[in-house]
């Protein structure tokens, strides 16, 4: 018989197992793989300890960068180098967002540094308005000159009047820029941060306004008598005059000039925008032209023999409002054209389909902007007002996932944040769905079924093969015929026949199907299983359940095929175990290494 100590150990382990598993049976959310843990973030700067000094240095360095950013942006605007201006603005905008996040994480939103962050955001918006207004003034001046050359005095006068209004709007921005500077200068003086570059940007903008005024009237605008602006050393309220005009800046002209038009000049999500243009100069045939919208590549075209080009661009992830569009080829830039993106309404749907014998539901729906499906859009899934998952729509605007609901009353809803996510689409919510869930007995029933099946198997083995479970005989058990019998050896069943090798062609089709849905774990797993089965069928690997991927990797050790196998297995480990999704070209490289490996095995009957 089994020793009492062994019986007690098994009994204790069984009780412990039941105690640990019961909460999971009653609350399925505990074993829901989609439930993510959250770590509270400290907002008290004192918790950083020795790192606080380093953090402070970073804060002040970021503040200095934000103060200095204005000078280069406005300097480029004054030089009418709007391409350089938009590049500088993009860097300034990114640094502003990073700085605001750091301030929030450190819990400094209510401090002087938090006030600095808010004033900097206001400054960023003013600079953006200056940038857009300056481009518009430049376009109106070009139109006015064109109409005058054509002899159309009415249109020329209309363009001049609109340019005058644009100048007035730009002049108002100078006052707003000075107001923001007063707040920033006061805080900068407290932390001993140099604000001279920011002050110089206001001087440069003042000079730019006088240039625009001269182009309108032909008269030199008088300099302001005095503008009250405290410097870093005079933040208490000392006054100084805003004077000094930067020297005129010569703009280099490329020998190749690019002109283009947008049709239409405004659009909504999903609209196709036609971009047509022409390159003038030498060597204009078969050149690649990149079209940018706000410093992001929007479309790519190739010029014809005569230098003309045409391409369509899709309005997708572009925020509502005015955007700057320009063309770039080699070292040549076009002028900037303004393009307006209008907001669209959206409709978000949600359906739940219950899976039998579980608390799982298939959650699916669609996101559309009018009649246009919204693809690659993030949709948030909420259960009882808590975010459960972040889903991404496919090309047809649909999304789908498996959802496990806890016991009790539940409300399920999906939310699309729209413009907060960078789309020119209004936010929307699906209709909430109420679901009442009872206790989930599926897991507990499965455990009991497994335990019962195990008992039945043990009893059956004892009855059919009595020699497999031997009895211990003590010294006082006496002797008998059984004592002289040879012990029975355990009878092992013959191994089951190996599973047939899955055709690599079928495996490759499954890989493509999973890859199209960004299901990379199953995609790479399909190729790995097919390869392993092929190696086993070729008797290059033993067939056993405990065969690991590391053992598969050593199948061709010190062999000419080892590089092919290593390349594929490295990709498999990175995706399946490291959860590192492949880059754009990686799926093709993975499939190529897998195919090459199969070809070296000579498996022509199953060639993918």
Image (cartoon, grey):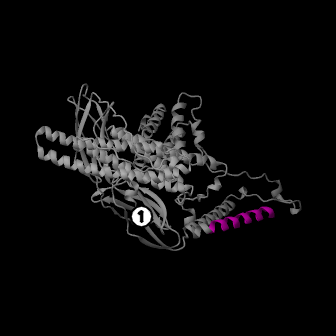
**Is the residue marked by circle 1 packed among few (<14), some (14-19), or many (20+) residues within 10 Å?**
many
Q: Residue at x 70, y 67 (%)?
A: 15
- Find out whether residue 353 is within the magenta segment: no
Q: Secondary structure at mark 1?
A: strand
| Dominant SS type (magenta) | helix
Residue 35 sits in quarter: bottom right
Residue 98 drawn at (x, y percent): 49, 49
Residue 127 drawn at (x, y percent): 38, 48
Near-viewer residue (81 or 90):
81
Relative to 331, does residue 481 appear above or below in the rendering?
below
In this rendering, would 71 be left or right of 345?
A: right
The answer, for residue 81, to whether it is visible in the render is yes
Residue 75 drawn at (x, y percent): 38, 39
The answer, for residue 376, to whether it is visible in the render is no
Q: Quadrant of the C terminus?
A: top left
Near-viewer residue (314 or 107):
107
Relative to 538, does residue 125 appear above or below in the rendering?
below
> Disc 1 marks which residue?
414
In this rendering, would 573 be left or right of 216?
A: right
Q: Residue at x 38, y 69 (%)?
A: 431
Question: Which portion, as a residue range, is magenta?
Answer: 1-22
Q: Residue at x 40, y 62 (%)?
A: 364
Q: Quadrant of the N terminus?
A: bottom right
Residue 539 drawn at (x, y percent): 55, 37
């Amino acid at each position: 018989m089994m020793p009492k100590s062994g019986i007690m150990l098994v009994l204790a382990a069984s009780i412990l197992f039941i105690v640990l598993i019961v909460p999971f049976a009653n609350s399925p959310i505990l074993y829901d793989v989609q439930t993510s843990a959250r770590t509270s973030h400290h907002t008290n700067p004192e918790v950083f300890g020795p790192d606080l000094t380093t953090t402070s240095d970073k804060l002040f360095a970021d503040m200095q960068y934000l103060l200095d950013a204005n000078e280069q942006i406005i300097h480029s605007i004054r030089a009418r180098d709007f391409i350089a201006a938009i590049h500088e603005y993009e860097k300034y905008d990114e640094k502003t967002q990073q700085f605001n996040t750091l301030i929030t994480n450190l819990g400094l939103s209510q401090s002087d540094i938090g006030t600095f962050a808010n004033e900097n955001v206001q400054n960023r918006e003013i600079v953006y308005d200056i940038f857009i207004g300056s481009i518009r003034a430049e376009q109106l001046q070009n139109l006015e000159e064109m109409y005058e050359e054509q002899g159309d005095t009415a249109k020329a006068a209309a363009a001049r009047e609109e340019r005058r209004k644009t100048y007035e709007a730009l002049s108002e921005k100078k006052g707003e820029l000075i107001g923001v500077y007063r707040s920033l200068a006061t805080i900068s003086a407290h932390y001993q941060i140099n604000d001279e570059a920011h002050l110089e940007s206001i001087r440069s903008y003042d000079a730019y306004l006088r240039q625009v005024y001269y182009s309108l009237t032909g008269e030199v605008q008088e300099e302001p008598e005095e503008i009250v602006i405290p410097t870093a050393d005079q933040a208490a309220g000392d006054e100084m005059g805003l004077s000094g005009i930067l020297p005129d800046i010569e703009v280099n002209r490329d020998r190749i000039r690019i002109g283009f038009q947008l049709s239409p000049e405004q659009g909504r999500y999903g609209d196709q925008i036609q971009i047509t243009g022409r390159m003038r100069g030498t060597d204009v045939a078969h050149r690649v032209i990149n079209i940018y919208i706000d410093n992001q590549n929007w479309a790519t075209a190739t010029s014809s023999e005569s230098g003309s080009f045409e391409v369509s661009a899709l309005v997708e992830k572009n925020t509502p409002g005015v955007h700057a569009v320009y063309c770039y080829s080699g070292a040549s830039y076009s002028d900037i054209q303004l393009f307006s993106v209008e907001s669209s309404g959206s409709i978000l749907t949600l359906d739940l389909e219950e899976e039998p014998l579980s608390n799982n539901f298939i959650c699916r729906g669609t996101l559309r902007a009018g009649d246009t499906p919204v693809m690659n859009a993030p949709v948030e899934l909420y259960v009882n007002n808590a975010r459960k998952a972040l889903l991404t729509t496919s090309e047809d605007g649909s999304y789908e996932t498996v959802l496990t609901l806890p016991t009790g009353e539940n409300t399920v809803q999906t939310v699309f944040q729209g413009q907060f996510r960078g789309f020119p689409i209004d936010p929307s919510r699906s209709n909430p769905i109420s679901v009442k869930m009872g206790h989930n007995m599926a897991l507990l029933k499965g455990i009991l079924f497994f335990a019962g099946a195990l008992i039945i198997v043990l009893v059956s083995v004892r009855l059919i093969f009595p020699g497999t479970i031997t009895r211990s005989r003590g010294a006082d058990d006496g002797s008998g015929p059984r004592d002289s019998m040879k012990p029975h050896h355990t009878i092992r069943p013959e191994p089951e026949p190996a599973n047939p090798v899955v055709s690599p062609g079928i495996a490759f089709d499954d890989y493509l199907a999973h890859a199209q849905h960004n299901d990379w774990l199953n995609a790479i797993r399909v190729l790995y299983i097919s390869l392993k089965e092929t190696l086993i069928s070729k008797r290059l690997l033993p067939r056993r359940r405990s065969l690991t991927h590391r053992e598969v990797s050593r199948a061709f050790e010190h062999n000419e095929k080892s590089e092919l196998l290593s390349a594929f297995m490295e990709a498999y480990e990175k995706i399946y175990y490291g959860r590192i999704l492949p880059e754009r070209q990686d799926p093709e490289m993975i499939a190529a290494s897998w195919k090459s490996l199969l070809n070296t095995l000579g498996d022509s009957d199953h060639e993918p």
